[in-house]
Image (cartoon, rainbow, N blue to C red):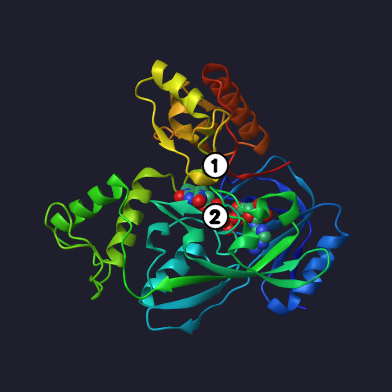
Amino acid sequence: MTLRIDEPASLRPFNSFGVDARASRLVTLEDPTDVAAALALLAEAPRALVLGGGSNLLLAGDFDGTVLRVALRGRRVVSAGENDAIVEAAAGENWHDFVCWTLDQGLHGLENLSLIPGTVGASPIQNIGAYGVEMRERFDSLEAVDRHTGERRRLGPADCRFGYRDSVFKHPDGERWLILSVRFRLSRSFEPVLDYGELRAELSARAAAPRSDGSGHRDTDRRNAPATADGSPPPDAREVAAAVVAIRRRKLPDPAVLGNAGSFFRNPVVDAAQADALAAAHSDMPRHPAGPEAGPGADGRPRVKLSAGWLIERCGWKGHREGDAGVHERHALVLVNHGNATGAQLLALAERIRASVRERFGVALEPEPTIVR
Ligand SMILES: Cc1cc2nc3c(=O)[nH]c(=O)nc-3n(C[C@H](O)[C@H](O)[C@H](O)COP(=O)(O)OP(=O)(O)OC[C@H]3O[C@@H](n4cnc5c(N)ncnc54)[C@H](O)[C@@H]3O)c2cc1C
């Protein structure tokens, strides 16, 4: 058995908030033949927590139980067709490294999801998404093991019940699954998704600027890439990835420098009548269709997605700081740890933000990260 067991262990290096919580026991799973032994350790523990890269959770305090850190590695092309290929990565693979590897294979589809922190195994948990693409659009299937029975299953999209920052794994009937590996169906031809104005602007700026960063070569396959409005050559997949990376580096705090878990709240979905009333009072309030999966509201009209960041900013929280717990100065949606904030302090700040948004706008915010109490 090659399981690594630390008793007790600081979880500070293993959560992107940099919260110094301790676990009674930390088990690191690196070898796939140790899965059954790892599950046995979880089963005997008073409480159990599965951890990937720790970039989407808030540890509210010490964890009196066993934490299983999934560090399984490996990635491969499972099957290669003329137009597409199925690729697989073990749960502990770093997500961004995996995206870069798919581009190295000449496979397209994940470039808009570049630089999202964390592991491949956690990507289905909240159906990660960015810049107009969600993981579920490229998802093929995953292999999971039932933590209680040891049964292994291949789960497809219908089993996973993906939604906006959501999946079956975030609900009681899906929490029993430990994800071991994930497969994606990726395309050989490049069909860029450039719905976001910010991404188009970054690409135009980069096309106009002399290339000085040596950031990779251009793909030869541009057949599906639409001509850009300013007449510059259409981007290739690496250029889209590089633009996404540049935007993210500019906009989001690096957890290695300033602890955070990305967006702390999901964008709330409300009935159209409530959105209308809010828009009447706040003409600059952003609002977007929530999509068919949100279903109709009580009035039968399609529901509306609001911007959690805008609501929080309007309540005056941007740049706010209470000790080492704070709200990022450029991003009202990102809670930050300026050094030694505890999980409880960050959680208390999050609760105050929620209460003020509820009081001022009558809108309930839900946290995006898993809160481990
Ligand atoms: C700076 C920053 C930017 C971010 N930007 C984005 C973004 O643009 N879009 C986006 O969607 N997210 C974003 N996130 C959130 C985060 O990167 C993703 O949710 C990521 O998928 C989390 O991966 P992780 O391995 O760190 O998961 P963890 O934080 O370790 O775990 C998250 C949840 O998944 C569960 N889990 C982890 N691995 C497994 C497994 N193998 N089997 C079963 N359950 C498991 C955990 O128990 C926990 O409930 C951002 C985070 C940061 C810090």
Residue shown at 22% from the left, 61% from the top: 226
Along the horizontal axis of the image, is 134 left or right of 23? Answer: left
Q: Secondary structure at mark 1?
A: helix
Amino acid type, mark 2: Asn
Image quadrant for the N terminus?
Answer: bottom right
Disc 1 crowd rating (10 Å Cα; few below 14, some 14-19, many 20+) is: some
Q: Residue furthest front?
A: 300
Residue shown at 64% from the left, 33% from the top: 347
Question: Is the residue marked 2 within 8 Å of ligand 1, measured from its CB?
Answer: yes
- The residue tagged 2 is 127
Q: Is residue 360 positioned above or below 25 on the image?
A: above
Q: Secondary structure at mark 2?
A: loop
Amino acid type, mark 1: Ala
- The residue tagged 1 is 294
- Location of residue 103 (image quadrant): bottom left
Question: Where is residue 75 shown, x and y percent of the image?
Answer: 53, 77
Instruction: Give the foreground label among 1 and 2.
Output: 1
**Residue 13 visible in this rendered orientation of the protein:** no
- Relative to the observer, which residue lies in front, 102 or 331? 102
